[in-house]
Amino acid sequence: MIETSTFWLRAAACLYALGLLHSLLAVGRKNQKLYPVALGSFRIGVVLHFVSLIEASMAYGRLPLDTVFEALNVCAFLIALVFLFFPDLKFTIGESRFDMHDLAFPGGLALLVLFALELADRVMMKRDLEIAREIQSWLMPAAPPDVRGVDIAFATRPANTVAGDYYDAFARPAAPGRSERLLLVVADVAGKSVPAALLMATLQASVHTLASLPASLLELVESLNQYVCAQNPGGHRFTTAFLAEFEPASGRLAYVNAGHNWPVLRRSTGEIERLRTGGVPLGIMPNSRYEHGSTTVAVGDLLLIFTDGLVEAQDEKEQEYGEIRMLAILEKISGGTAAEVMQQLMTSVDAFVGAARQFDDITCLVMRATSPA
C-alpha cells in the first residue's frame, strides 16, 4: 500500500504543479479565464491527495504523523482543501485585501515544496520497507523441512510490503525416550503492515527459543502467551496461533489452538475433522490456561492450517471466499502432493477474487502423511 500511496501522491503533485502553472500564466497574462483551470487542477489533485492519505493510513493502521514530512503532508492537504471549498474567499490583513486568486500561485508553490519533501521521505520509506521485507523472508523457511514420511508445503501472500502472518515447520530437539517431533506453527498478529510485522518477528524468535527447551507443547504455548502479553501491555495486538507437534513414527499429532481458525484434517476416507481445542488468542491474558488436543494422522491424511485471510478473501462484489469453497476443494482431492494441494487451493482463491484488491495477508500450510517414518 505504500507503493500505491506514493503513486497517488505523485499524481496529486503533478496536478498541483499544473494548477500552479495556470495560476502563473493567469497572473502573468492577466487572464482571469485561466483561474478556473487552475482551480480544477487543484480540485482533482485534492482528491488524489486524499486517496494517497487513505492508502498510507491503511498501510500504517492509522493516519501517518510520525515524521515532520508526514505532518507537513497532512498540512498540505488541508491547505489544498481551502483552495477546493473556498475559491472565492476574501480576507483582510491590516489595510491589505486578499482573495484566493492572489494566493493561488504562492499557495501552489508551497504545496509543491511540501510535496517534494514528502516524496523524498516516502522514497526512503519504500526502500526501508523493501529491506524489511527481505529480512522478514529470512525469518520464515524458504523450503519445507525434509522429514521422512511427511510432505509439507506452505504459501504466504502479504497484503502489504510486510506482513503479520507467521508460518514455520522445524524439528524439535529429541527428548529422552521419544521419537523425532516436528513443530508446525501458523500465527496471525492482529493488525497490518509494519506494526504487525515487528510483532511477528519477536514471535518467531520466541517460538524458536522456547522450542529448544525441554518443555511440552502446552508449556511452550503458555510461556509464549506470557511473553506476548509482556510485549503487548494494552492487549490491542493479540495473536491468534495454531501450534502442533507431530511424531512421524507414531502418527500422533498434539496441538493447541490459541483462538485461531480451526485447521482442517481431511482423512484419506474423505472424513473432515476440525482441530479446535486450545484457548484464547495469545497476548490477551498472561495467566490464561490452555488445553491441548490430540489426534492421529494416518498415511494419506491431509492437514490444512490457514489464516483468516484465506476464507475472508473478497471478490469485486465484496463476497468472501469462505470455508464452504475451501472445504469443497479439499473434498475433491483424493491424492497428490502437499504442493499440488496448495496449488489447487491458491488457484481457487485467485479465480474467485479476480482483480479485487485484498486487505489481509493469506497464509496456508499443508501437511500430508505419506508413510510411517
Image (cartoon, rainbow, N blue to C red):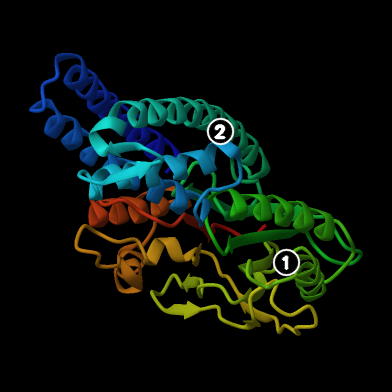
- Which residue is found at the position 77% from the left and 76% from the top? 218
Visible in this render: residue 118?
Answer: yes
Q: Nearer the viewer, residue 322 or 301?
A: 322
Residue 122 vertical position relative to residue 154 in the rendered view, above or below: above
> Which amino acid, by three-letter code, is at mark 1?
Asn
The earlier-in-sequence mark between 1 and 2 is: 2
* Residue hosting label 2: 125
> Which amino acid, by three-letter code, is at mark 2?
Met
* Residue hosting label 1: 232
Locate residue 26, reporting x and y percent: 17, 21
- Which residue is found at the position 84% from the left and 66% from the top? 178
Residue 215 vertical position relative to residue 66 in the rendered view, above or below: below
Residue 189 vertical position relative to residue 282 in the rendered view, above or below: above
Visible in this render: residue 355?
Answer: no
Q: What is the quadrant of the N terminus in the image?
A: top left
Q: Secondary structure at mark 1?
A: loop
Q: Are marks 1 and 2 in contact (CB under 8 Å)?
A: no
Q: What is the quadrant of the C terminus in the image?
A: bottom right
Q: Nearer the viewer, residue 23 or 11?
A: 23
